Amino acid sequence: MVDNRYATALVIGSVLSLLACVYLSVAMGTQHWYQYRSLPPSNDINNGSDLQGLRTEFTTEDVDEKTYSDALFRLNGTLGLWWRCILVPKNTHWFREPVTHSTTSSPSVSFVSEPKLETKCVAFTLSQQFKTKYEEPGNHNSGEHLLRTYLWRSQFLLPLVSVGLVFLGGLIGVCACLCRSLTPTLGVGVLHLLAGLCSLGTVCCFLAGMDLLHNKLELPEGVTYSLGWSLYLALISSPLQIMAAALFLWAARSHRKNYTRMIAYRVA
């Protein structure tokens, strides 16, 4: 027989675990971890052909880190764990075409409205996720940057490990319910605690990697960056998993203490 306090703790912990898993899954599958805001293409100091070249190279599979980073900087890019995206006009023109209006007095020239923009996204391939990062991004002769390399690989693997631990904990929890025992709940709590640390580690690795990248590549003039909502979802999932772990551990430990006392009382 399970005390109502322990049952309530298990239900709340399960809800927190489900929310954390959903938040982390959404964060992994979206690209809004890091956002760049740059000058409009029509006002960029470089010509349109340069931007068109960046757009073309951005979608290739063998694109190097410097090339797609430049595209992110200059084309209002967003970056995630699995995706990179840029904001480009739907048409192939990178400028506003002038329109001449004839009047009785004199002709006047005006410009059409801003072109409609669309988001163009490309997924990182598995080989790109484990690709070596160099001291100078894009320069293969500059030597490997071990810290950036393993930070990038960690930010890809840690969320997968976190979700896997939560699912494993869920399976153990189902088995515990079928066996009508709270003892396995202790293992569920430990798994959720490890999952929370992995989620927190994902965010830390991503932010550290981006900071190192910005130290290597100077942002163009007028470009700003900010954290996106996907990163905040991943960040929120970590305390939710840790709170769920605390509830599971408390329920398992308290129930075991009460059970031990009850057995000792019956023996006495």
Image: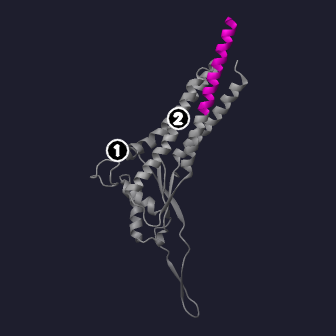
Question: What secondary structure predominates along the stretch shown in magenta?
Answer: helix
Residue drawn 67% across and 30% down?
11
Instruction: Residue 184: give x, y in percent of width and height.
Output: 58, 22
Quadrant containing the C terminus in the rendered view:
top right
Around disc 1, counting alpha carbons within 10 Å, would you say few (fewer than 14), some (14 to 19), or many (20 or more)? few
Q: Quadrant of the N terminus?
A: top right
Q: Is residue 249 magenta?
A: yes
Q: Residue 167: tell me if it is visible.
A: no
Magenta residues, start to end: 244-268
Label 2, secondary structure: give it: helix
Q: In the displayed structure, does residue 63 sit left or right of residue 252?
A: left
Spot the residue most to the bottom. 105
Q: Up-down: is 221 above or below 82?
A: below
The outermost residue toward the left is: 141
Please report the residue visible at 46 percent of the width from the left and 47 percent of the height from the top. 206
Q: Position of residue 10 (x, y in %)?
A: 66, 28
Relative to residue 216, is residue 171 depicted above or below?
A: above
Magenta includes 98?
no
Towards the viewer: 78 or 149: 149
* Quadrant position of residue 196: top right
How many numbered dots are placed on residues in this image? 2
Instruction: Find residue 97 and name its label.
Output: none
On screen, residue 206 above or below 104: above
The residue pinned by badge 1 equals 146
Mark 1: which secondary structure? helix
Callout 1 touching callout 2 (CB < 8 Å): no
Residue 193 quadrant: top right
Residue placed at 64% from the left, 32% from the top?
A: 13
